[in-house]
């Protein structure tokens, strides 16, 4: 693909400046320096899922009960497994564009406690069994084996499992991408895409796409990547043929909290200082169809606490009280009671892109030249090194190992019987109600 010379005419335009959009532009530029590439997204990234994330590299802690017994769910899990092996090298590459080297801090503690539902015990049993079968290193620990997990009495741990998941601040990854683009001539538009038009002049090589930005600027391209999460649906709706064939995206709202210890504790103490010793992610398994409670340490008494979860047909700009209430209760009652004295600020909401069948939208649609890196729910950041590499390869005419079942233009994927769906719903609803205080 040769570079184009017209000011606003590009070989590839990527809509979305989160982990998947920027990651795809990064992989394209790495593979073909001759491409003219534009990436579109507001610098504030309001509502972006990546900015509201902790962010964890979630693989084993996110496995659902029976995940590998269903082909579609197994394929989705394999996306995270493939990505996990790429993160260390990905950070090493991006470190050329950072002030301090980037690295994933590996290690996550999954906690089963008396406040969880019976479903959570079965879920952790399943995770352990799968890791044993696949010879994945892990440890099943006694309830008191981790000295800084000090919950209230009513939230006492039953067992703790250490798995090889990790964490890295997502904001540092995005900053590295921005510096890479500035150094490698990728044009970044601090703007929003408001209008999409698809022509029919070149049906054999991909018709021209015109994207009108909020500022009135018009970009032209034959290759368009929709990677702006749920925000992409407004553009999809403008192309009736695309709207009919691609599962609709809805708004998977999630908020987190930035937690820190006040200055007087740093200066004078007065609390059990084990809260400063947190050296790995600690979390429950998924609850009520959501990602449970998780605490991500940043060091020096700084933490991320996540995350609320709700799926809306319209975005809500602020988190709901009950969602934040659950997080605060979980932090104090299930992780460490000393956090009762912490200070906090809200991060988010970020909108995880959730398709109507909950599976990702990956690759080229049935309309030539319109590509998707989308619908990844809460796995987008974790999967980004792998998904972006494979999508970029396919855009450039190479192979892709992504499952064909996740192509954007498809029928909804059905993967449960009515009985299984009802049983799963009851288990998820029960888990959610327990988290909200059901006794």
Image (cartoon, grey):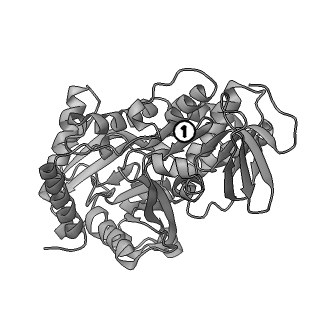
**Left of 400 or right of it: where is 197?**
right
Residue at position x 20%, y 27% from top? 133
Residue at position x 50%, y 54% from top? 298
The answer to whether residue 410 shows anywhere in this view is yes
Dot 1: element: loop
Residue 438 lies in quadrant: bottom left
Residue 207 lies in quadrant: top right
Circle 1 residues within 10 Å: few <14, some 14–19, many ≥20 = some
**Left of 243 or right of it: where is 288?**
left
The answer to whether residue 169 shows anywhere in this view is no
**Left of 177 or right of it: where is 151?**
left
Q: Picture coordinates of residue 57 (x, y %)? A: 43, 43
**Left of 93 or right of it: where is 147?**
left
In the image, farthest residue toward the bottom: 321
Task: Please give the residue where the numbered disc 1 appears in the rendered image.
Answer: 103
Number of residue marks? 1
Q: Nearer the viewer, residue 36 or 138?
A: 36
Q: Picture coordinates of residue 335 (x, y %)? A: 30, 62
Q: Nearer the viewer, residue 359 or 48?
A: 359
């Amino acid at each position: 693909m040769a570079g184009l010379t017209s000011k606003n005419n590009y070989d590839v335009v990527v809509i979305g400046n989160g982990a998947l959009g920027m990651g795809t532009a990064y992989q394209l530029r790495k593979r073909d320096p001759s491409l003219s590439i534009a990436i579109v997204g507001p610098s504030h990234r309001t509502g972006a899922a990546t900015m509201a994330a902790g962010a964890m590299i979630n693989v084993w802690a996110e496995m659902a009960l029976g995940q590998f017994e269903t082909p579609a769910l197994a394929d989705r899990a394999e996306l995270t497994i493939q990505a996990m092996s790429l993160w260390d090298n990905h950070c090493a590459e991006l470190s050329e564009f950072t002030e301090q080297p980037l690295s994933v801090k590996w290690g996550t503690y999954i906690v089963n406690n008396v406040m969880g539902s019976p479903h959570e015990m079965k879920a952790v049993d399943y995770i352990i069994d799968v890791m044993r079968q696949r010879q994945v290193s892990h440890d099943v620990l006694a309830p008191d084996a981790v000295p800084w997990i000090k919950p209230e009495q009513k939230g006492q741990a039953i067992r703790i499992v250490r798995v090889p998941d990790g964490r890295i601040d997502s904001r540092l990854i995005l900053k590295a991408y921005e510096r890479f683009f500035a150094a490698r001539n990728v044009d970044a538009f601090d703007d929003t895409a408001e209008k999409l038009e698809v022509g029919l002049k070149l049906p054999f090589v991909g018709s021209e796409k015109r994207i009108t930005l909020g500022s009135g600027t018009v970009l032209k391209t034959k290759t368009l990547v929709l990677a702006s999460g749920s925000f992409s649906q407004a553009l999809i709706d403008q192309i009736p043929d695309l709207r009919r064939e691609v599962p609709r995206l809805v708004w998977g709202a999630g908020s987190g909290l930035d937690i820190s210890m006040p200055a007087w504790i740093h200066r004078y103490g007065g609390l059990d200082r084990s809260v400063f010793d947190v050296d790995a992610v600690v979390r429950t398994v998924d609850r009520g169809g959501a990602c449970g409670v998780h605490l991500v340490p940043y060091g020096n008494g700084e933490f991320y606490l996540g995350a609320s979860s709700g799926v809306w047909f319209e975005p809500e700009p602020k988190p709901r009280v009950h969602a934040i209430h659950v997080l605060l209760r979980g932090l104090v009652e299930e992780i460490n009671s000393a956090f009762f004295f912490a200070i906090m600020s809200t991060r988010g909401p970020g909108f995880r892109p959730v398709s109507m069948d909950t599976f990702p939208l990956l690759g080229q649609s049935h309309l030539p030249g319109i590509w998707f890196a989308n619908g990844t729910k809460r796995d987008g950041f974790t999967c980004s090194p792998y998904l972006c590499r494979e999508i970029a390869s396919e855009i450039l005419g190479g192979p892709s190992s992504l499952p064909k079942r996740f192509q954007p233009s498809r029928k909804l994927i059905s993967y449960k019987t009515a009985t299984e769906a009802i049983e799963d719903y009851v288990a998820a609803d029960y888990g959610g109600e327990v988290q909200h205080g059901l006794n």
